[in-house]
């Protein structure tokens, strides 16, 4: 089945550090990738949608200069949290889809980001 | 704006019980509805996907129904097991091609 690998699974770092999270589709081409954020005991909130080779589309209220998304190939997207602060601590999850909207999204295992 | 609500927020049951988890959405103009399972600290595992033209989908002990006109879906879990303990999320794909998630039902099945 379709597998999405997300790395790292956990990051703990000091305030002011920039953190990069990778999302890879292992056995399919991810024409579209999605980045979500999840606070404790809350649901997933879409941050941005990216199509391979194009600039990401950010949801309202998400700072594009804070959360840099790159989708340079059909199997890899990265999310960089720049100059992270404690309020950026959260669980970040990526998903990937091959093809049009009615195709299912396949999710990674998430990254727990903790900023001290 | 599409809003997705799940009831109950938490559920604790003994092993062997049949369960019904509820999901409701405010805008019936959806493309599909999906049920996911999330284990603590993990990503999402897709359980069932129902297209807007379908009424239900079944996989093993799981059955999901969709009543688009009333904005409701149910996930039925038969003969629950401790391994079913997790958070169950429903999500609808709306006309903007985005998945809108509910807040989930935290299920605990005890032996």
Image: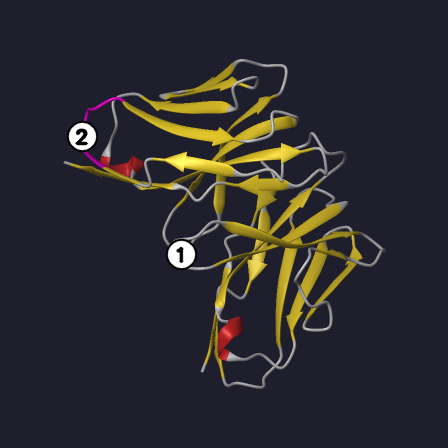
Question: Mark on residue A66?
Answer: none
Residue A68 location in percent, x, y? 71, 68
- Can residue B17 be found in the magenta stretch? yes
The chain carrying label 2 is B
Q: Position of residue A12 (x, y in %)?
A: 46, 77
From this viewpoint, which residue is outermost toward the right?
A53
Give the residue drawn at x 41%, y 36%.
Answer: B6
Q: Earlier in the sequence, mark 2 or mark 1?
A: 2
The residue labelled by disc 1 is: B41
Quarter assignment of residue A84: bottom right
Labels 2 & 1 near each other (Cβ < 8 A): no
Please give the range of residues in magenta. B12-18
**Measuring 47% from the left and 49% from the top, which residue is drawn there?**
A43
The residue that mark 2 highlights is: B15
**Above or below, B27 relative to A69:** above
Q: Position of residue B22 (x, y in %)?
A: 39, 28
């Amino acid at each position: 089945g379709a597998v999405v690998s997300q790395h790292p699974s956990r990051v703990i770092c000091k305030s002011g550090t920039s953190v990069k999270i990778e999302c890879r589709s292992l056995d399919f081409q991810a024409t579209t990738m999605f980045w979500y954020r999840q606070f404790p005991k809350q649901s997933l909130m879409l941050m941005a949608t990216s199509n391979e080779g194009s600039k990401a589309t950010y949801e309202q209220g998400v700072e594009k200069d804070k959360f840099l998304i790159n989708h340079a190939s059909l199997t890899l997207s990265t999310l960089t949290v720049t100059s992270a602060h404690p309020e950026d601590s959260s669980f970040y999850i990526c998903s990937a889809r091959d093809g049009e909207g009615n195709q299912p999204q396949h999710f990674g295992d998430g990254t727990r980001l903790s900023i001290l | 704006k599409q809003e997705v609500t799940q009831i109950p927020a938490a559920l604790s049951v003994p092993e062997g019980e049949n369960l019904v988890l509820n999901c409701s959405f405010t805008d019936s103009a959806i493309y599909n509805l999906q049920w996911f399972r999330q284990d603590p600290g993990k990503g999402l595992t897709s359980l069932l996907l129902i297209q807007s033209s379908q009424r239900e989908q079944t996989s093993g002990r799981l059955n999901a129904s969709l009543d688009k006109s009333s904005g409701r879906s149910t996930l039925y879990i038969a003969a629950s097991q401790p391994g079913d303990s997790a958070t169950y999320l429903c999500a609808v794909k709306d006309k903007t091609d985005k998945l809108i998630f509910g807040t989930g039902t935290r299920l605990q099945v005890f032996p």
